[in-house]
Amino acid sequence: MSRQNRIEQALNERFAPERLAVINESHLHAGHHHAGSDHHEAFDGTGETHFRIRIVAEAFAGMSRIDRHRAVNELLAGELESGLHAMAVEAAAPGEATRW
């Protein structure tokens, strides 16, 4: 199973979102250096190392933006420890305005 599929499955199981988009943005980071990772040379943009997560779920109602990010980060800690380099999280509760 791909990293993207694992992330989608975990988010669906934990938050039961009404909207979810997990976007692989690894190609946007080609040429960057990842200090402390397997990418000692400039990163070539391949693989599943950078993702944007857009999620709308009732579970986020009443939570601050930081608490929403913490909840997603805690859920995906295993991915972050096993090669996921960066994750942008755009989390909202139903009815809240989003930019997407």
Image (cartoon, rainbow, N blue to C red):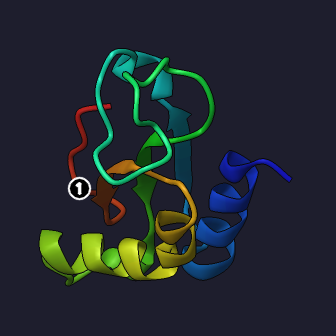
Residue at 52% over, 34% down = 23
Percent across and percent down for residue 38 are 50, 46
Corner quadrant of residue 78: bottom right
Give the residue number, with chain letter if any, for mark 1: 96
SS at mark 1 in the image: loop
Q: Is residue 46 above or below residue 95?
A: above
Corner quadrant of residue 9: bottom right
Left or right of residue 2, residue 62 in this image:
left
Please name whichever residue, 46 or 6, is drawn nearer the observer in this view of the structure: 46
Percent across and percent down for residue 15 are 54, 76
Percent across and percent down for residue 11 are 59, 67
Q: Is residue 38 above or below residue 77?
A: above
Please name whichever residue, 80 or 43, is drawn nearer the observer in this view of the structure: 43
Please name whichever residue, 94 or 12, is drawn nearer the observer in this view of the structure: 12
Left or right of residue 28, residue 15 in this image:
right
Percent across and percent down for residue 28 are 38, 18
How many labels, in total? Answer: 1
Residue at 23% over, 33% down = 99
Corner quadrant of residue 17: bottom right
Type of amino acid at the residue the image marks with label 1: Glu
Residue at 37% over, 22% down = 42
Left or right of residue 66, residue 96 in this image:
right
Left or right of residue 70, residue 22 in this image:
right
The residue sitting at the right extreme is 1
Q: Is residue 24 above or below residue 97?
A: above
Residue at 33% over, 76% down = 60
Which quarter of the figure is the C terminus placed in? top left
Determine crowd level at label 1: few under 14, some 14-19, many 20+ residues with C-alpha closer than 10 A: few
Please name whichever residue, 58 or 40, is drawn nearer the observer in this view of the structure: 40
